[in-house]
Amino acid sequence: MAEVRLENVCKSFGDVKAVDNISLHVKDGEFIVLLGPSGCGKTTTLRCVAGLEHVDEGKIFIDERDVTNLPPAQRGLSMVFQSYAVFPHMTVFDNIAFGLKLRKASPDQIKERVKEVASLVQIEDLIDRYPYQLSGGQRQRVALARALAVEPKVLLLDEPLSNLDAALRLQMRAELKLLQKKSKVTTLYVTHDQVEAMSMGDRIAIIRNGSLEQVDTPERVFNHPENTFVGNFIGSPPMNMLECDVVEGGSIAIGNFTYKLPESVVKAIRKTKTSRVILGIRPKNITITKEKRKNAFMAKIGVIEPIGEELVVNLTVDGKLLRVIASPSQDLRMGEKVWLTPDTRKIHIFDKKTGKNLL
Ligand SMILES: Nc1ncnc2c1ncn2[C@@H]1O[C@H](COP(=O)(O)OP(=O)(O)O)[C@@H](O)[C@H]1O
Ligand SMILES: [Mg+2]
């Protein structure tokens, strides 16, 4: 088991800064997820840790050992890719045994270890099959078993579930998490899927344009996003973002309405001397009523999307789109004018200029 530390790691391809000064401390036994949109540098970061890319600047440590200039084989880690590269001409047994043979383990040792990891990922019964005789999920398990067989200090996973269908992905998500908890292997897991990240990670490292935006627990990134990017990226439907002017008396202007902010929020805004802010509020934290309420603002209902137990109600406020999760028991109609009351305890205020959360 091991800690992984990245210190000011940079990696460019020509003009593209794929990894832009990333520092990250992954604790022993931790499951950390690198999350971000396509092209933000997740794979490159992982490949730098693996030693498959040489960093331009910065250092990488595994435990106290500086591995920055070590070849992949000497770093003590295993990597599983999106396209679960299992060897097609080898049985499951030989696939799993591959790394052990390279390490010159004895036949008995190999047999025992293969049995152990095959049972861990629940493919004991498939040991004599060839990959073409396996489903996608089973093949991915073989890839995992092969990675775990060599008892890596660190496991690197690059979108390992993205080639699986939705149902299997859900199942494997839970299995992988359990497997990681059982094996306690320090894991860096890459995905662009925020739900996957939220459900699996002990902590999530959110990356944009090669830079870390926030590294925090799933609970923290959801409830305390450090900036508009994180607020937007985490949660579905995404957080509503309304640009507003700060007006006299501790309020903000939303279209023709003034929305009174709690005193603590007003104080935080005052400190920054900003006059343009973004009000962030999640779709679940707004109540729709037909009657006017205190500190509510008016909106017009657009399309209503039923999604089973809930409705996603699209509304416009001052020409801007807002989404609210409502109950199907509420009798709402397209074109109707209604009142929206944000839950004051759940609002976020971001600086319009910097995007930083002011609270
Ligand atoms: N070998 C390469 N040569 C040139 N550009 C690359 C190479 N690998 C990645 N990039 C670029 O670096 C950026 C980050 O890529 P990548 O790490 O693959 O992102 P992600 O995994 O988050 O989708 C992208 O702009 C990508 O086009
Ligand atoms: Mg990638």
Image (cartoon, rainbow, N blue to C red):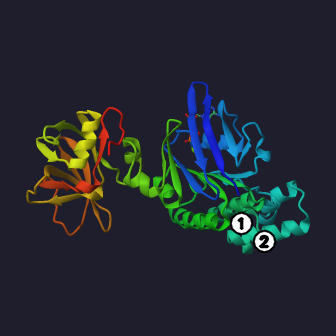
In this view of the protein, can residue 267 be seen by the observer? yes
Point out the image quarter for the N terminus. bottom right
In-front residue for pair 144/5? 5
Q: Disc 2 marks which amino acid?
A: Lys
Any mark on residue 133, and which? 1
Viewer-side label of 2, 1: 2
- Tell me residue 86's x, y (percent): 73, 56
Q: Is residue 74 left or right of residue 341?
A: right
- Tell me residue 345's x, y (percent): 26, 56
- Tell me residue 151's x, y (percent): 76, 60
In this view of the protein, can residue 127 be seen by the observer? no
In-front residue for pair 267/336? 267
How busy is the neighbourhood of tag 2: few (under 14 within 10 Å), some, or many (20 plus)? some
Q: Disc 1 marks which amino acid?
A: Gln
Label count reads 2
> On screen, 38 above or below 179?
above
Please tell me whether mark 2 sits on a helix, a strand or a loop. Answer: helix
Quadrant observed for ligand 1 in the rendered image: top right
Any mark on residue 115, and which? 2
> Ligand 2 closer than 8 Å to the CB at disc 2?
no
> On screen, 325 above or below 272?
below
| Residue at screen point 41% across, 51% down | 234
In-front residue for pair 40/311? 40
Q: Considering only order in the chain, which callout, 1 or 2, is on the residue closer to the N terminus? A: 2
Please tell me whether mark 1 sits on a helix, a strand or a loop. Answer: helix
